[in-house]
Image: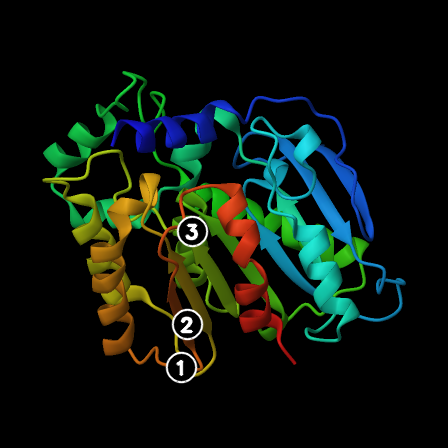
Amino acid sequence: MYKACLVAAALLAGTQLSAQLPTASSGRLVRLDSFPSKYVSKRHIDVWLPATYNGRTPHDVLYMHDGQMLYDSTTTWNKTDWQVDETIGRLLQENAIRPVIVVGVWNSGSGRHADYFPQKALDYLPAAIVDSLYAANRQSGQSVFNNQKVHSDLYLRFLVEELKPMIDKQYKTNTGRPHTFVAGSSMGGLISLYAICQYPQVFGGAACLSTHWPGIFQEKDNPVPAAFFAYMKDHLPDPATHRLYFDHGDQTLDAWYPPLQKQADEILRQRGFVPPALLSRFFPGTDHSERAWASRLAIPVQFLLGK
């Protein structure tokens, strides 16, 4: 358990890194430096344009959280990355997916947890419990929320009202729901699910890898998963027009997830999410890391963008 909490803490601590532009192994990267917002703190946006992008042919758009961890291991805190450019570049070369650009949205460092925790799930908890969540610490003693209130509704407004219009204006994109996707891991998985629930008219699919259903870093007697599941029952989008991908391993922090993902899968099925609208995968022996997510990234990408 201690190792799992260290992994999670490192994900947060590692966000305050060099602002060096990553180097793409295929396609090219464009940095939108310190992108301003009236809703959340400014942050870098790293847009990956594949070799297929010529400014004339419309491309779908995949928005990904924790953008500093996506493309280049030499610029990340733990010297690993998602290998987004390699994997999606290869799938495009193989003609396995539709043309797509990737918008990597950097996390805000100390505000990451407050950005990514699904805000309306708190409405399903008594006020005293919410107060206790804000007082919760990691095993290291560091505050989970870093003394910030959850503001994921504002984070989603930033994505939908500020970032997406700019991306659609600056690049040749397919702008509609069937061509707009969101993805992330851990807390990034939670905010990806929250995004498609809150804005089903904007996002047509979400990929949620190693979704951090506990919400905080407490495995037992934790009220948060039940609140997330209650929110899901009330707010999941229409399975006729949306796709959802989930996965998890069973090592390090992922060891907490198998029983929780089972509960989530049952709710999804009750709400009509069955194949081909749903894909939920278990990867035994895999942990909570960029290496693990990179090794299986092709699966959710093809699920969302396959021809």
Instruction: Please give the name of the residue rendered at 54% of the width and 35% of the height, measured from the top-left corner.
Output: 107
* Distance Cα–Cα, label 3 vs label 2: 14 Å
Q: Is residue 98 above or below residue 225?
A: below
- Relative side of 151 to 102, left or right: left
- Relative side of 101 to 256, left or right: right
Task: Name the kind of residue labelled 2 in the image.
Answer: Leu
* Distance Cα–Cα, label 1 vs label 3: 20 Å
Q: Is residue 156 above or below residue 112?
A: below
State the quadrant of the N terminus: top left
Instruction: Please give the name of the residue rendered at 43% of the width and 78% of the height, measured from the top-left corner.
Output: 277
Disc 2 marks which residue?
A: 279
Task: For label 3, count other residues whose C-alpha is less than 10 Å away and answer few (under 14), some (14-19) or many (20+).
Answer: many
Q: Is residue 55 above or below residue 105?
A: below
Q: On residue 153, which mark appears?
A: none
* Distance Cα–Cα, label 2 vs label 1: 6 Å
Instruction: Please give the name of the residue rendered at 73% of the width and 47% of the height, measured from the top-left corner.
Output: 47
Q: Is mark 2 in CB contact (under 8 Å) with mark 1? A: yes
Task: Identify the coloring.
Answer: rainbow
Task: Name the kind of residue labelled 1 in the image.
Answer: Pro
In x, y percent, where is residue 31?
Answer: 77, 38
Task: Name the kind of residue labelled 3 in the image.
Answer: Gly
Disc 1 marks which residue?
A: 275
Which residue of the protein is positioned furthest toward the front in this rendering? 285
Per the image, label 2 sits on a secondary structure element best described as strand
Task: For label 2, count other residues whose C-alpha is less than 10 Å away and answer few (under 14), some (14-19) or many (20+).
Answer: some
Disc 3 marks which residue?
A: 189
In x, y percent, where is residue 153?
Answer: 42, 46
Residue 59 seen in the current view: no
Q: Is mark 3 in CB contact (under 8 Å) with mark 2? A: no
Q: Is residue 255 above or below residue 97?
A: above
Q: Quadrant of residue 91?
A: bottom right
Count the numbered circles shown. 3
